[in-house]
Amino acid sequence: MISTRTAAGAVRAARLAVATLLVGLARAGCERKPAFLNTDVTGADFGAGFALTGHDGKPRTLADFRGKVVAVFFGYTHCPDVCPTTLSEFAEAMRQLGPAADRVQVLFVTVDPERDTPELLSHYVPAFDPRFLGLYGDVETIARTAKAYRVFYQKVPGQTPGSYTVDHSAGSFVYDPQGRLRLFVRHAAGPGPVAHDIRKLLDE
């Protein structure tokens, strides 16, 4: 026969086990990372920021956009396919986000500073969405910025000196509102997954 003292001890032990389990589940819920559809690069040791000039002539750094989700894409205005596709997908993602899109900033960093003048960027980039901003710098600054993001780019000669193309990395980098690099978006990821992940960052 089990004594009253033994039974009471068993009840206390059971209650303690249940309480411990509940605390563990609560902690797991708090620590669980968001289920992103794009590549989670939280804690990455690259892409710390930039110091460039906007197509509006204003100096720009990542800190200027604190409080917003920021997407950074490296490309050039003469790009025949990857760049317009990427900007179009981000524009559609903005549409899907609705009013929340006002808390998002898409930045287009040129890898062709010789041809992409501020005037050209000011016509090209906002054509996809008026809120998008083109960024530029001199040849050395662009090279340094691309290196900081581990972005590759290289001229490919054309039939004339001014008709070259530029091979370049095709992914995008997304920061949370606190300015931390969180996502890498592969080319042609689709606007749906992009909008999904941006919502999660805005809701954190």
Image (tube, helix red, strand yellow):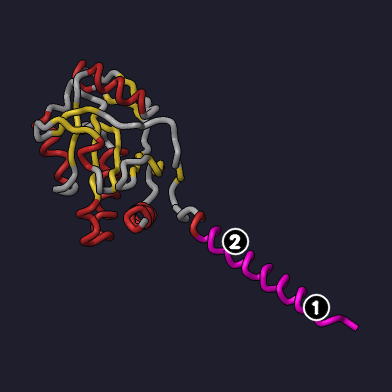
In terms of depth relative to the viewer, which is nearer, 157 or 24?
A: 24
Mark 2 / mark 1, whichever is N-terminal: 1
Residue for badge 1: 5
Quarter of the N terminus within the rendering? bottom right
Q: Residue at x 15, y 33 (%)?
A: 54
Residues rendered magenta in the picture: 1-29
Q: Residue at x 29, y 54 (%)?
A: 93
Q: Which mark is residue 105?
A: none
x and y percentages locating residue 53 in the rendered image = 16, 29
Q: Residue at x 37, y 25 (%)?
A: 152
In terms of depth relative to the viewer, which is nearer, 34 or 15?
A: 15
Amino acid type, residue under disc 1 in the picture = Arg
Q: Residue at x 23, y 25 (%)?
A: 112
Judged left or right of residue 23, residue 127 is left
Q: Is residue 7 magenta?
A: yes
Height in image: 10 above or below 113? below
Which element is circle 2 on?
Answer: helix
- Residue sticking out furthest to the right: 1
> Which picture quadrant has residue 27?
bottom right
Judged left or right of residue 31, residue 95 is left
> Which picture quadrant has residue 145?
top left
Q: CA distance from mark 2 to mark 1?
A: 29 Å
x and y percentages locating residue 51 in the rendered image = 23, 27
Quarter of the C terminus within the rendering? bottom left
Residue for badge 2: 24
Amino acid type, residue under disc 2 in the picture = Gly
Judged left or right of residue 171, residue 164 is left
x and y percentages locating residue 97 in the rendered image = 27, 59
x and y percentages locating residue 140 in the rendered image = 25, 16
Label 1 crowd (10 A; few <14 / some 14-19 / many >=20):
few
Q: Are marks 2 and 1 in contact (CB under 8 Å)?
A: no
Label 2 crowd (10 A; few <14 / some 14-19 / many >=20):
few
